[in-house]
Amino acid sequence: MIGLAFLVLLAAAPMSPAEIEKTVDSGQLDDAKAAMQDSELTPLARATLEGRIALAEDHPGLAAEKFAEAVALAPEHAPLRLLWAHALLRAGAPQRVATALETLEPTDPAVALLLAASREGQGDAGGAYEALEAGAREHPKDLQLTQQLILLCAREGLLAATRSWIETLDPAQLDRVVALALLQEIRGDAHALPLARMVASAFPDDADMQGQLGWVASAAGATAEASRAFGRAVALGADEAYTAAEHARAAERNAEALRLNARVRNDAKRAQQRFDILFESGKMARAIAAAERITLSPRRRYNLAYAHYALQQYAEASTQARRLSGTDYAARGQTLLRAMGR
């Protein structure tokens, strides 16, 4: 009986601050709150734990207040200042981050990242670059600083600087997530294709990477290259067959467009695209057969009418042209009817 009572007492022992912190880290926030009520905590420990819980519950403003209280009690405690700065960023107060970090070394990687985020959050991309560059020069082995410099330069459209920072890394150090984010940043830049090729070449067997390369090539007007990149993505398992076929069609690579179209997973989209490719490649009889499998929009109905007209099937061409009455293609339908003398 004595042994059992001793075990009960042990089970009821209050948690230490470190144990409560582990409970917060594991996501057991209600248990952490209950443990705080049962524990005799110092004001510093209580403010810190309340801040951690508020941050975990997505209340960054409250978390920032609690961390500020904690920092006031322990102004030289660096991790608390980092938590305070992080909470301020999440709370949408980047202008206060510098104050939170004022006693810390600005080139320390964790500090440099927070300073850069705060300056970019205030619209100061140059200041963000300076903070990251200073940290990267001081800590060249810290990959995260260089990776964030790469993304910052990409966001600002500084393609030459982006490439220069990439070239400071070994291919294996260009993290896949960072590389994908980079390609997404530059995918609308018509001048970014050479950089995109370099990045994607480090991930030749990555479907998402090849798909992103396709979008950059598309923005650059390189439709044939875009089609090939999307085609590689399809071969690697991506659901990009429709997009790949559209780019092959735009590049007038009709045989390739049909091959890729056959891999489109959505039945309706595949049938409609097949009709378009056949019509635009001049295969009128096959286009007419393909039209039987689709719901005709006014544009496709006009094309179907024209396909019959091209094959001198004037009766069916006239029927389809008359069905364009009341649509945006009515005038074109009337022109076709006049061409047939009807």
Image (spheres, rainbow, N blue to C red):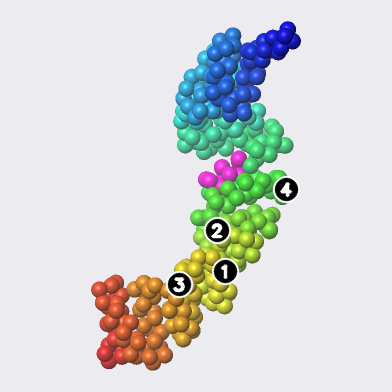
The residue pinned by badge 4 equals 172
Looking at marks 2 and 1 on the same chain, the residue that comes earlier in the sequence is marked by 2
> Between tags 4 and 1, which lies in front?
1
Compared to 38, does 304 lie above or below? below
Q: Is residue 152 magenta?
A: yes
Residue most toward the front?
1
Residue most toward the top?
2
Crowding near pointer 4: few (<14 within 10 Å), some, many (20+)? few
Amino acid marked by disc 1: Arg
Q: Nearer the viewer, residue 327 or 84?
A: 327
Q: Which mark is residue 263?
A: 1
Whether pointer 2 and pointer 3 mark residues with C-beta atoms closer than 8 Å, the reply is no
Rendered-image quadrant of the N terminus = top right
Amino acid marked by disc 4: Ala
Distance from label 3 to label 4 (Cα)? 42 Å
Q: Is residue 71 visible?
A: no
State the SS at label 1.
Answer: loop
Q: Nearer the viewer, residue 35 or 253?
A: 35
Distance from label 2 to label 4 (Cα)? 22 Å
Looking at marks 4 and 1 on the same chain, the residue that comes earlier in the sequence is marked by 4
Q: Quadrant of residue 113?
A: top right
